[in-house]
């Protein structure tokens, strides 16, 4: 097996793990911001809840939904990538993920900021699936743009 194939397999395993065992999927209570996103072309749905601290840090996050493995695992990966980060860092991570899926060149530092969300990078080979991968990121942008 080639090194590239091993690399692809590893990232496929990450996506499947996040799909089967989504992170940060417990609904929040108390005072939180919330949005829902829907992809009418495939039926994917995401519900995103955030609690932002007074010092503009993602204090709590919940991502739930239904749909394909790409949309749901991307939401889980996104939640891990932004939890505990400042609003400014979250905005930067979101831009970097979008740039990655558009096959734009990113610095090593920008790629590092994405964390495990890099696992969805292979989706760019399938343009019709990019909307699935970006559904939770679009919901995040909607909430974060308020800050």
Image: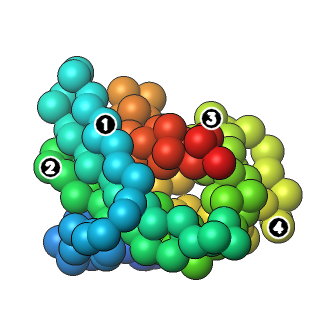
To which residue does mark 3 refer? 102
Mark 3 residue element? loop
**Mark 2: secondary structure:** strand
- Mark in front: 2 vs 4: 2
Residue 81 at x, y = what percent?
54, 69
Instruction: Report the residue at 42% width, 42% height from top.
Output: 139
Residue 74 visible in the snapshot: no
Tell me the residue at 62%/35% (across/down). 102
- Tell me the mark number nearer the camera, choosing from 1 and 3: 1
Q: Is 77 left, or right, of 45 in this rendering?
A: right
Q: CA distance from mark 1 to mark 3?
A: 21 Å
Looking at the image, is mark 4 or mark 3 earlier in the sequence? 3
Q: Label 2 to label 4, Cα distance in Å?
A: 32 Å
Q: Nearer the viewer, residue 29 or 89?
A: 29
| Residue tagged 1 | 37
Binning the other alpha carbons within 10 Å of mark 2 as few (below 14), some (14 to 19) or many (20 upward) gives few
């Amino acid at each position: 097996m080639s090194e590239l194939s091993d690399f692809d397999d590893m990232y496929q395993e990450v996506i499947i793990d996040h799909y089967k065992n989504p992170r940060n999927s417990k609904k929040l209570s108390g005072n939180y911001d919330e949005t829902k996103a829907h992809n009418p072309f495939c039926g994917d749905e995401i519900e995103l809840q955030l609690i932002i601290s007074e010092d503009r840090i993602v204090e709590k996050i919940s991502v739930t939904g239904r749909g394909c493995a790409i949309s749901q695992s991307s939401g889980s990966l996104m939640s891990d990538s932004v939890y505990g980060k400042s609003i400014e860092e979250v905005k930067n991570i979101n831009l970097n993920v979008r740039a990655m899926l558009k096959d734009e060149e990113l610095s090593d530092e920008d790629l590092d900021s994405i964390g495990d969300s890099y696992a969805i990078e292979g989706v760019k080979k399938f343009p019709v699936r990019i909307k699935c991968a970006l559904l939770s990121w679009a919901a995040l942008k909607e909430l974060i743009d308020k800050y």
